[in-house]
Every structure is written in structure tokens, then in C-alpha cells.
Image: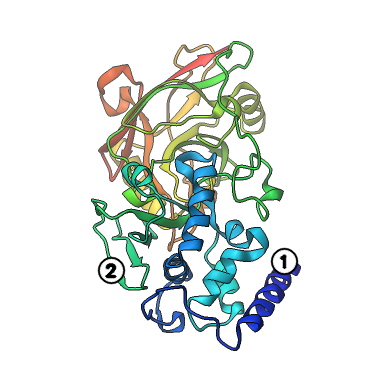
Amino acid sequence: MSRRLLCCTAFLVGLAACHGEEAPSPTGAAPAPTIAAVEASPRERLALRLAVALNDPATRAALKRKLDASHAPEGKLQFQALARADQGLLLASLARGNATSVADLLGDLDAARPLEVYLPVESHRRAWQGEATLLVATIGRDGEAPVAYDLAGHRRVLSADTPPSVPVLALVPQETDFTGGRPLMAASCYDLCGSTSTGATSNLSSTAGLYLTTSHFEDSFESWLKGKPEYEYHVYGLVAGSEAEQLSCTGEHAGGYSTFDQNGPDWSGSAMLLSEQERQRYAAAHPGAPIRIVAYEDDDEACVPRIDGNRVTQLLSAVDAAYKSVTSGKVEPWYVKGVRAAPSLFNLYSAVRNVITTGDDLIGNAVETSVAGWVPGGANWVLKSDGTRTYGWFGTAYRP
């Protein structure tokens, strides 16, 4: 057991001893199902624990203060670190709610992988002032119906398409970097750990590379419970044979010139897809090799695709078959758009984290409009999946 877990365990065991053999239920709570009886994921068990703990007015008020003080997008907080903050006060509240061991609670916190907690619906954020009228909900994959608990611990299934009128606190897989670009601080940081201002500067003339200039998506690819979408463009290159590696990522948390934050169907601006330095390094290692540009909606760690590798291979194979494998691009600095159609020589199986239970959403593989056909807005690339189905489009330019 890690030193951190031993400290937390010792603290909570001591706290439980102060309260007697079994810690009391939160004030006014109706009897809730025991955690051991919940046949669910660690994340859902934690959602139940949190809901029951929030039946205590003091615990709700403390959480409300933390949410109001958050500098993260949509008022998010990192859940595992929040639970351990303030000498483990929230941990103690979570442990008191049901008759299970502290070790089981800590095990669920670790097994659930990083989580974030917040009110994803803007009207709920404005309306909720710490009242007991609240649901705690969680979800795995987008498209699933969220599972929610009221503060008495009663389970219900919510609509996958429409949020309820009752405010909903989401406990969902983490999409936000709470460390301010300092990952070693993740264990102690439940807010932003200082400024994370890494937005792309407007002075782009000094940094050469292939840039994204416009972007359109036909869908948000995101559940209402997970708030705003986290769109990302990933550039892949050849390693050896048909193996691939990720060369670069453009997204909200990519940092610097590669920062790109699109929260609606359309975006325009300037965000780097591939720097000139990255292009030269790739060209030197693999002369004449193409790149693939793929768009994702991120549901987990930023710029790290976690997705079913077999499913990705099937989808890209269908796109390759539909367009005679002209589904990649060749970066050409002399060409005003920066990248032109080229035959594909590789798949992405080796370049994605092959995760089936929780994964990002593959939006589509880029196919040049000269191959795929015209799209609105003057975009020169179309995002294709499921064979020839269009999921979006984007424009590029090369800046010397």
C-alpha cells in the first residue's frame, strides 16, 4: 500500500474510533443500500457514497464553496484529490455513509481512475445554492443513460438525451488537466494549481508549421452529463511497416500554439496541427511517408486516445476501402493549404490505447475534398467514418 494511502487509512481509522464501532449516517439521511450490495463499477459506488454524504448540510456547504472557488472550466474539481483535501474531511464523510471498510473506499478511489466532479448543466450551476434537492450522477460511455442517486441513496436512471430539472452533480472520468501542466502535482491538486494559461498566442509568424484554420463537427459526441465537448485533432505518422505513432495533438489542453477549444459546431482561428520541426524530424526518419489526421472527442486523458483499437481499425478500413486508400496526406510547406491527399500506408491500432470499457469517441479520418467531394465553407478536408459518412470538415494552411 502506498504511503499516501497508509496515511489516509490511519486518519480515517482514528476518526471512526472516535465515533464508535460504526460511524453514524449523515444527518437526516434515509436508509441507503449498503455499498457492498451495489453490483456496479467503482465509479458508481463512489457516486452513491457521495450522494449519501451530501445529505449532511455541512458537507454540501463545503463542496459548494469548493465548486464556487474553482478556476477550472465549468467549475470542475479533481475528485480523488478533493476527497483527500483538508485532512480527509470528505473522505471521512464518504466513509460514514455506509457500513464498509476504509480500505474498500480507498480501493474504489484508486480503481475508478481519475474523476472530476462538477455541475455540467449551466442552468443547474446558476440555480444550485447548496440545497438538498440534488442528484449525483455518473456515466461511462457517451450515449449511455446516466445512473443517478438522490441524497437518500435511491438509484434512478436518467435520460441519455435530456437533463432533469433537478440539479445534477456529475462524477465522471476526468477530461481536464488540473495540474497546470505539472503532472507530478496531480495527487495534491484539486483545483488548477495556479494559472493554466497556455492559449495560442496571436503572433504566429515566428512559428512555422501546418495550422488548423476552420473546423466543423456535425455532432457534439458528448453526453450532457459530461458538459462541453473536448474536440481534438491528432496527427499520426509511420513508424515501421504498417505501425503508426502519434506525432502531435491539437486540443484544449495541448498547450501553446496547439491549443484549440471548440465548444460549438463551428470554429475558426489558428491552431497548430504539426510544427515545421516535427515535420522535418518525421521526414528525415521516413522520407516521403504520409500522415493521417484523425479527430476525436476526448473522454479521458487529454491528447491520449483511449479507444477500442479493433473498432478503430474496422472504421478506418471501411474509409480506406471507400476512397481507394487515398485517406492520408503529405505535408508540403510550399503548398498554401499545407497538406495534400496521399495514399495511406498504415493503420492506427498500435497508436491508440486499446481500451474497451471507457474510451474516447473517434469522430473521423481526414479525407481531402478532392477525393471525398466538396463541403461547405471552403474546407479542404472532410472527416469520414462508417465508410463514406461525413462527421465534419476542416481547413488548413501552412505558415512559413
Report how many numbered discs are placed on residues in the image.
2
Which is nearer the eye, 134 or 33?
134
Residue 320 location, x and y as percent? 35, 41
Instruction: Point out residue 328 in the picture as x, y percentages from the top left corner.
Output: 43, 32
Q: Quadrant of the C terminus?
A: top right
- Measuring from the top left, give residue 18's x and y in whole percent: 65, 81
Residue 218 visible (yes or no): yes
**At 28% across and 55% down in the image, what residue appears?**
166
Mark 2 crowd level (few <14, some 14–19, many ≥20, 10 Å Cα): few
Q: Which of 29/218 is in front?
A: 29
In this rendering, the answer to whether 57 lies above or below 20 is above
Above or below residue 22? Residue 238 is above
Q: Earlier in the sequence, mark 1 or mark 2?
A: 1
Q: Residue at image x 61%, y 86%?
A: 20
Reading the image, the residue beneath label 2 is 156
Q: Which residue is mark 1?
A: 4
At a point 70% along the width and 49% down the height, the residue shown is 185
* Direction from residue 318 to residue 129 in the image, left or right: right
Q: Is residue 308 visible?
A: no
Which corner quadrant of the image does residue 153 belong to?
bottom left
Report, in whole angstroms, how far the alpha carbon at label 1 lies from the one at label 2. 34 Å
Q: Position of residue 225 (x, y in %)?
A: 35, 52
Q: Secondary structure at mark 1?
A: helix
Q: Is residue 27 left or right of residue 92?
A: left
